[in-house]
Image (spheres, rainbow, N blue to C red):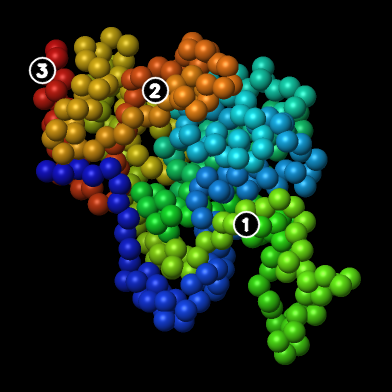
Amino acid sequence: MRYPFGTITITDKAKELVNKALESKRVSQGKYVKEFEERFADLIGVKEAVAVTSGTDADTLALSVLYDYGAKRGDNVIIPSLTFVATANSVINAGFVPNFVDVERDTLNINPERIKEKINEDTIAIMPVHLMGKPADMNKISQLAKQYDLKVIEDAAEAHGTKYHGRDAGTMGDMGAFSLYLAHIISSVEGGIITTDNKDYAKILRSLRSHGRWCSCSPCRMNITGDYCQRRFQDGKDMRFTFQRIGYSTKMNELEAAVGLGTLDIYHDILEKRIGNLDYLIENLQEFGPILQTFKKEDYEVIGPHAFPIILSEDAPFTREQYAQHLEQNGIETRVLFDSIPTGYDSFKFMGHTRGDFPESEYIGEKGLHIGVHQDLENDHLDYFLEKTRDFVGLHS
């Protein structure tokens, strides 16, 4: 049996919209992108959503908004030391410095009790990550942000459908940044989207995604007489080619938005299926006691499952590599559970951290892996994984 890590469901409606976009020859940002943004915003309950080309760009643009509010290049942003590397890359790409905080082993998320000690005069924001769809402790994070006058940008890349005390991921900070990569619950194959209740932030985001233009709007009936936009020329300048800020080229296109609209139609079905798969695996992994561990679901949260994390105990009689190899040999795709970014990746050696600075992240990086929990997996797949795990653990007992 093959147990793939991820999948994407492309609906008949998505195919129809893609074909319509191709036939119209309007394949750059247009009406489908606008519809996708509006529906995504409605789904999670915010006023604004701005679509871009990736989750990394979503993080980067959300951070770049802060320059309009007094941030300076070289300021620092607090992020977890264990997450997908895109979170840290986006901080660097936006011109800031990652200020790493260790995570909790039982949640995989930033340890809120360790944040305060890292805040300094150059700290401008906290960017918690809801890793694997498990929500970070937003109550404590929000309290700290308020106390120290910091912005909160949620990295909700893997957290479609995640809720914390009844509130959706992407609605609890100043902005939320989602990935729409093909393995995620809502997908446009590639893509990202930023959510906010602040209309000024949204206006800046639309400028940033189009090179920092002054005019980032689509021509609308109010401003047009015939073919002439009354706001286009001001003070002898063409406002479509006047640039207010350093920007990016990261607009979502119509083909991606069409696929995204298709997954929005079946979002609740996908989420329900994934939650069922996650619950099944959490319950049945208990068979393997302390040797194999995963996170715990709390009563106040809904985990929007991206994948299923597994962490080996300190006294496990086998290595993560041996276990992963066994699963792979039996057709079960695995991924490592990331690593401590500042001490595990060559790309961040320049920051000067040493092994031991982030012990929980380093432990998970050595002992953790994750497997799929997606909507194409049936109980037969999950039972097959459990059977192969049972065989492997039995050999090492």
Q: Dot 1 lies on which element? A: loop
Q: Is residue 8 above or below residue 232?
A: above
Mark 2 crowd level (few <14, some 14–19, many ≥20, 10 Å Cα):
many
Mark whose residue sits in front, 2 or 1: 1
Residue nearest the viewer, comparing 74 with 2 = 74
| Whole-percent x, y for residue 249 in the image | 59, 57
Marks 3 and 1, the one that precedes in the sequence:
1
At label 3, which amino acid type do we have? Leu
Q: CA distance from mark 2 to mark 1?
A: 34 Å
**Residue with the mark numbered 1:** 209
Left or right? Give the position of 227 relative to 369: right
Q: CA distance from mark 3 to mark 2?
A: 24 Å
Q: Residue at the location (49% across, 10% down)? A: 356
Marks 3 and 2, the one that precedes in the sequence:
2
Q: Dot 2 lies on which element? A: helix
At label 1, which amino acid type do we have? Arg
**Residue with the mark numbered 2:** 365
Q: Is residue 314 above or below residue 389?
A: above
Marks 2 & 1, CB-CB < 8 Å contact: no
| Whole-percent x, y for residue 360 in the image | 46, 17
Q: CA distance from mark 3 to mark 1?
A: 54 Å
Q: Is residue 216 above or below residue 246?
A: below
- Could you tell me which quadrant the C terminus lies in? top left
Marks 2 and 1, the one that precedes in the sequence:
1
At label 2, which amino acid type do we have? Gly
| Whole-percent x, y for residue 341 in the image | 49, 26
Marks 3 & 2, CB-CB < 8 Å contact: no
Left or right? Give the position of 10 relative to 206: left
